[in-house]
Image (cartoon, rainbow, N blue to C red):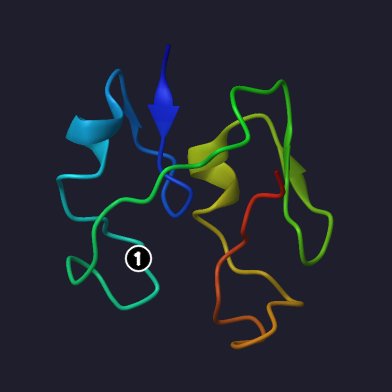
Amino acid sequence: MNCYCKYCGAKNSSIASLTASHCPRHPAGANKGLHALYEGGEKAKYVCKHCGTSNSSLASLTGSHCPRHPLWANKGLHEPAL
C-alpha cells in the first residue's frame, strides 16, 4: 500500500515514515510543517476540491496554483478532493 501527502503528493510505503518528514508545499511554508496523509487512496485522476481541475498525478495537481483557492486566490495550491 502506498501513502501520499495531501500537500505535495510525496509517496511512501509507510504512514509513519511519510508523516515524519517535512513537506516543501505545506501551507505553513516550505519545511515548516510535516507531510499530511492524503486519505483518498490511489486514483486514476485526482480532482481539486476548489476548482475541479484534474490530473493523473497527485504531485502535479498539488504543484500548481488554484484560481479559486479560498484563502489565496491564485496563490494557494490545488487541494485534492477525497
- Examine the rendered structure and indicate whether residue 24 appears above or below residue 45: below
Count of numbered circles on the image: 1
- The answer to whether 31 appears left or right of 82 in the picture is left
Residue 64 x/y as whole percent: 56, 60
Residue occupied by mark 1: 26
- The answer to whether 73 appears left or right of 36 in the picture is right
- The answer to whether 38 appears left or right of 69 in the picture is left
User: Which kind of residue does numbered mark 1 sit on?
Assistant: His
Q: Quadrant of residue 79?
A: bottom right
Q: Quadrant of residue 54?
A: top right
**SS state under label 1:** loop
Residue at coordinates 18% horizontally, 32% vertically from top-left? 17
For label 1, count other residues whose C-alpha is less than 10 Å away and answer few (under 14), some (14-19) or many (20+). some
Residue at coordinates 70% horizontally, 43% vertically from top-left? 82
Residue at coordinates 41% horizontally, 43% vertically from top-left? 5
Q: Nearer the viewer, residue 18 or 11?
A: 18
Residue at coordinates 68% horizontally, 77% vertically from top-left? 69
